[in-house]
Image: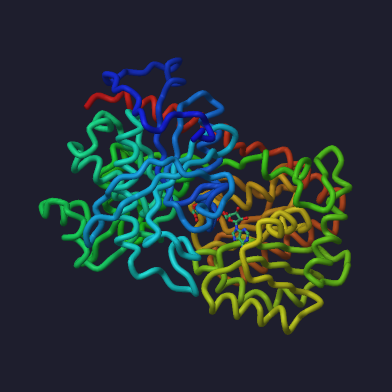
Amino acid sequence: MALPHGRDDSVGRNAEPARRFGAEEALALRVAIVTSEAVPFAKSGGLADMVGSLAAALTRRGLDVTLVLPAYRCIVERTDVAATGMAFPVPAADGIERTEILEGVAGKNTPAWFVRADRFFDRPGLYGQDGGDYEDNADRFAWFARAALALLARLGPYDVLHGHDWQTGLAVAYLRLQPERYPALASARTLFTVHNVGYQGLFDAGVFPSLQVDAAHYWPNFEFYGNVSYLKAGLTLADRLTTVSPTYAEEIGTPEQGYGLHGVFSERADDLVGIMNGADYAVWDPATDSFIARRYSAADPAGKHDCKRDLQQRLGLPPADAPLAGMVARLVDQKGLDILAGALDALLSRDLQIAVLGTGDPHHEQALSGFARRHPDRMAVRIGFDEALAHAVEAGSDLFLMPSRYEPSGLNQLYSLRYGTIPVVRATGGLKDSVKPFDEAAGEGTGFLFEDYASAALVQAVDRALDCYRRPAAWRRLMANAMAQDFSVDRTAAEYAALYASLLDRAD
Ligand code: ADP
Ligand code: GLC
């Protein structure tokens, strides 16, 4: 059958001798990105936005990029994903699981391939459901790693294999430890990006034999306090590491933020770089956003008021002129929900409306919903994953709350800046790198930051924002500063392209 991007799947590209790259030749780089999420195919959070938009931006730069994901149910059901007829056996923990290969296109013309095994991926969730993880995640993502490499070895060669987070730690590890199984990839260099050290892919040590890795690698590469860590495998075996902001790259080398892996990060400090994520302004820009009630821009901001009324109406909030603070997040501890809960009584006593969209831990969902029930004229909470509403919250809010305990990069504050929705954020990770404190006298800065991980500090930061909101000229200046920021994913892609090129130039 005709494939969406016109590539003949039955013929692997001919192997070429390993090449060395100069700056101009970087355009020819062949990069295989292995990931558990990428827009538009599968998303639970910013990982999907970042990987999908990075792949598309790299393709725009002229790199030859290929994406590989698991064929989740939500992907198999898409009408723009087609079977290729390609199929082959892949080892699983308990025998052989045959994979069928599907394909589609990410962005305008980035080929995306999906490895299908319904036993593992024909489920409602990506990693779990009803608030819990799937019990066989160790097997699911070990199989995914092998299937992805087996597929890429048929499609290859590639210059770089780029994995993301614990779900692909084993892809990077297997390529290093068992290169003879993937001859067409043998010369590929590996890059592993950690988006969030709080998620490590930790499994009972009993899974180790099923990984079929030489026991000599258990202690140095897999063992983490008596468990097996897929994240550690990727971190210790990749040629080079990145994380998603410069500040987070420093933070994870400390005992407070390294989640037990600070030693590994310190050892690999020379191979680790923090590259700030970027926003896909083709998707996140109020001047073109098709999800919002009325488009607006820095030059013509009037439509933002309509977006606010629309949001209030959608959420059943009164059409008040009080400032509206929005939040869109996975409802997990990382996002600072405990200090938010501790701040809400004070915040709801201010002249302020609050709108929250999120899904995650049931206790956070219930706590937030409880506040909304008690203050229906002030606070609205929607539990669920709703892309359209996420855009409406960005466009219709005046402030955007991110009181994160830690935040490797954060994308929502980048979107907020573009929507003139002023971020109130904790000074951590990528939030600190992208939001600059507003200095009214100098007319500089883009938001409000606080240091202490404490409810009182959050309330103080919101109070500073509310104080500024009462002075229209100052607020207009702040909005203009925010909307003028450029955190485009194209910048991020330029940094990754340079890194890929340097990876190939590096002496062995
Ligand atoms: P994280 O990756 O830690 O979740 P980011 O700020 O990097 O945080 O990215 C979050 C992304 O996920 C944004 O695109 C945001 O709009 C989206 N998102 C999170 N929760 C929801 C939800 N309940 N509905 C729709 N989009 C959501
Ligand atoms: C993670 C982080 C978030 C980051 C995203 C994409 O989910 O929590 O801060 O923006 O990955 O890199």
Q: Nearer the viewer, residue 39 or 299?
A: 39
Ligand 1 visible in quadrant: bottom right
Viewer-side residue, 301 vs 209: 209
Report the number of discs.
0
Q: Is residue 105 above or below residue 440?
A: above
| Residue nearest the observer in this picture, 391 or 503 | 391
Please say which color scheme the image uses: rainbow
Q: Residue at position x 44%, y 67% from top?
A: 128
- Foreground of the two, 384 or 411: 384
- Residue 461, located in which quarter of the rendered image? bottom right
Q: Is residue 18 above or below residue 396?
A: above
Can residue 262 be seen in the rendering of this structure?
no
Q: Position of residue 440 (x, y in %)?
A: 76, 48
Question: Picture coordinates of residue 388 (x, y %)?
Answer: 70, 56
Q: Quadrant of residue 200?
A: bottom left
Q: Is residue 195 above or below residue 60?
A: below
Q: Residue at x 44, y 50 (%)?
A: 195
Q: Quadrant of the C terminus?
A: top left
The percent coordinates of residue 449 (x first, y second) are 62, 56
The quadrant in which residue 156 appears is top left
Provide residue 471's location: percent of width, then percent of height.
85, 55
Residue that lies at the very extreme toward the bottom in this rendered image: 374
Q: Residue at x 22, y 40 (%)?
A: 176
* Residue 344 is at least partly visible in this image: yes
Question: As drawn, is 487 to the left or to the right of 34?
Answer: right
Where is 69 relative to 363, above or below?
A: above
Q: Would you say 390 lies left or right of 96 here?
A: right
Work out which residue is located at the far front of the displayed protein and give it.
1
Residue displayed at 24% across by 68% down: 204
